[in-house]
Every structure is written in structure tokens, then in C-alpha cells.
Amino acid sequence: MQFKHLYRVLAGGAVSALLFATPTEVSATPVFARQTGMSCAACHFQRYPMLNAFGREFKVRGYTMKGAQETIEDKNLSIPSTLNFGLVSKLRYQKRNGSATTGTPGMLNDGEFQIPDEAFLSVGGRVAQNIGFQAELNLANVATNGVFAAFKMPFVFEPTPDIVANIVPFTTDAQGPSYGFELLNTGAVRFNRAFEHRNETSAQQYLGTATQATGASFALYNKLGFLTYAPYVQRASNADPAFSSGEMLSYLRGAVTPTVGGWDLAAGFQLWNGSSKLEVAGTETPTSADVWALDAQAQGNVGKLPLGVYVTYGSAAASSAGDTNVYNTNTAGDKTALTLAAELGVIPYKLTVGAAYRNASSGASASDAEDAVTLGLNYMPAKNVTLQVNHSFYSYDASLAAAGDNLTTLMLYSAF
């Protein structure tokens, strides 16, 4: 493995951090911060988008909490006087160290600026006393991804003082069925994770569970855990509004979320299965889902320093003739991954360092091992601006000469 390039990137990241080193008191979640008048530290562990226990409660209650804003009240009406928007952008530079000089591998080997990698308008908040919503409107790649990157509308009920029920219609272009209702930071849903290199640091993301999905989540929650079931369908392109519902795939999620000795703990499972039809270029293609995953997290303090630890394991069954598992099209073997990750706030809510390990198998009949080690650094000049550096070292059975066995990502994330 070559470390020389990594040292240069980390040094550049440190210099960039110093250039941004005037901290400000702005919140990382502009839509909900404007609604509630609360700083992002109230809902997030270490940094956005990692949720803490209070953030989970806010999400479970459908983004309906009132606070800073006036509301318009009438019989069966309770809405903020202002509809809140936020601009979210992710600017990235990526470089690999392979020998390929053409196509996408060649661009990454030369070093590629992705500006923007993501850009969308975030809209959300209170719709009624027990109804909220969240939407993401694409500002980039609209022709291929459509305007709606994601939308969900939680309907919240409290059948007992200790139980909250959610019914959440949703659609997403890249978050998978877990987008409807998810509370952990393990990569169980694409957005909530500690590292930008998602496939290298989360088993669920390596298995490809972040897909287009449209459906509805039915969830029960109390402070000790939650259970979610979501029937859903997929489609080949989120830009095409026409897709067949047919038979629906199913997603089941359960987790326990106790607090022990001041540590916010969680452990759970995920199941994707069923048979359906996927629309590809206007043609319905039979498809199925057969995946399971286990995950756990621990968030707390070591002395005065915040520490998050995240563990995931998952498996996607091999496809068979006439029955394609959308999460593993390989017919030779199961696709599996184990990831271990940790992030330490060396300067709390300002600078974090992290490391992750992935042990994975692609399910190929030969040369299937796809292991990786990832190092990460996050600097937050403001609570809604993050400068992140990730560097991954790959150790595969298959040759990586063309694509490279190192990947470096420098990312500037902002939301305001």
C-alpha cells in the first residue's frame, strides 16, 4: 500500500481546515433548526447527520415539534407561518491510483472533481399537529434522477403514553425502503453514516440496499426500541413516473435502543425479501429481494471525548436462473460483508478522526474477497459545514492494477 499520497491529501485537508477556522453558531439542519429554533447539537451526535436519542424522538414524531416559529392555528389546521427551505450541497474531489487511462476508471485515476456530487433543496416540517413531511428537490442530474430525490410524510399516532406509531408514505431515488423509517447511524439507510465511503464502511451499503424505492412504512416505537414493516416497489429510473406496482417486495426492521451507563446503545436486524417486477426501459422484468443484515452501535464519551462505534454484518443470497436477486445478481455464491467502524471527537463537535475495516465477499466463483481499510477525518468550521477526508486501502483477490487499490476523497458538505 502506498501512504505517500495519503499524507499529501491529509496535509492539504489540514491546511484547508485552517482556512475555514472561524467557527460560527449555525445549525447543520437548516429546515428543522429554523422550525424549532434549536442548534443541531440538540439532535445530532458529534455532527450531522448522526442522530442522538433526542434526534430520534424528533424524527419519530414526524418533524412536527414547534418552537421558534409562529404557527397558523384553526380547527384541524396547525402549520408554521413560513415554509422552510434549505440548500444542501456536496462538493467532492476523488482520486484512485490505478493504471487505467480511459473511461470512468481513467478519470478517477487522473483525479476527478465532482462539483456538485449532490445538490438539492431540502423542504420539510410541520403539516398538522400529527403530520409532518420531508422532501428533497434535485438541483443536479434532474434529467436522469427527476425532480423528486425523496419525499415522505409521517402520520403520527400515540396509542399509549409510551408508544408512538408512524405511517409513512415515501419515495426515494437512492435511499432504499429503510428511508421510510430508520433511526440508527450504521448505514442501515444510506444517509446516516459516519464515513463518506459508504460501501467500505457499512455492510448494508456494500450489499447495495440503497436503491430506488416507493412504498409505505408502518412503525411502532418507544424509547427502548422500534419495529418497522414496509411494502415497497422498485424501478429502474426515478425520472420515469410510470412503474408497475404488481406484487410488492417487503422490508422488515427491528432494533433495541437502551441507554446503559450513559451510553446510547442500539442493536437490530433488517430483512428484505419477496418477488416483484422491475420496470427496465418500459419492460417488466421479474425480480426478487433476499437480503438480511445485523447492526449495532454505541455512542457515548470516553473521558470528555465523544466516541461512536458501529458494527454491521449482512448477506445477499445468490441469484438463480429465472430468479434475480436485485441485491446480488451473482449466481455463484452469497454476497457478504462485515464492517467495524469507529469515530472519535478529538476536539468535541469540531474535529473527529475515524477508522473502519471491511471484510467482504462479492459472491463470485473465484477471486471473491473484497476487503478494505478506511481512514477518515472531519473538520467542522461551522456546525452546518463539514470538510471531510476519507482514504480507503483495498485488498482484493481480483487484480486492482487498472482501477487502483487506493481511493482518496476530499469533500466539502454544507447545508444552509
Image: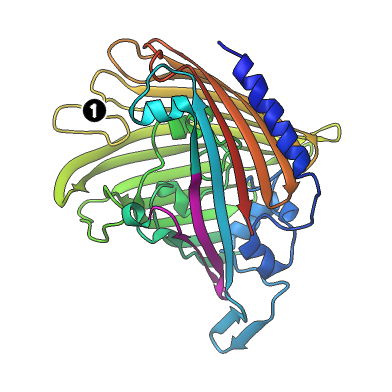
Q: Residue at x 36, y 21 (%)?
A: 362
Using the image as rendered, state which of residue 12 and residue 287 is in the foreground. 12
x, y percent for residue 5: 60, 19
- Which range of residues does the magenta coloring cover? 115-141
Disc 1 designates what residue? 319
Using the image as rendered, state which of residue 137 and residue 190 is in the foreground. 137
Looking at this view, name the residue that lies furthest to the bottom.
74
Q: Quadrant of residue 286?
A: top left
Q: Residue at x 66, y 23 (%)?
A: 8
When the figure is inspected, residue 201 is found, relative to residue 370, above or below; the finding is below
* Residue 78 in magenta stretch: no
Q: Quadrant of residue 375?
A: top right
Q: Residue at x 30, y 29 (%)?
A: 328
The C terminus - image quarter: bottom right
x, y percent for residue 388: 64, 37
Q: Is residue 360 left or right of residue 52?
A: left
Q: Is residue 175 left or right of residue 124?
A: left
x, y percent for residue 74: 59, 89
When the figure is inspected, residue 209 is found, relative to residue 98, above or below; the finding is below
Q: How is the protein colored in the picture?
A: rainbow
The N terminus - image quarter: top right
Q: Residue at x 56, y 64 (%)?
A: 62
* Residue 124 in magenta stretch: yes
When the figure is inspected, residue 137 is found, relative to residue 291, above or below; the finding is below
Q: Mark 1 belongs to which amino acid?
A: Ser
x, y percent for residue 327: 32, 34
**Can residue 307 be seen at all in this image of the molecule?**
no
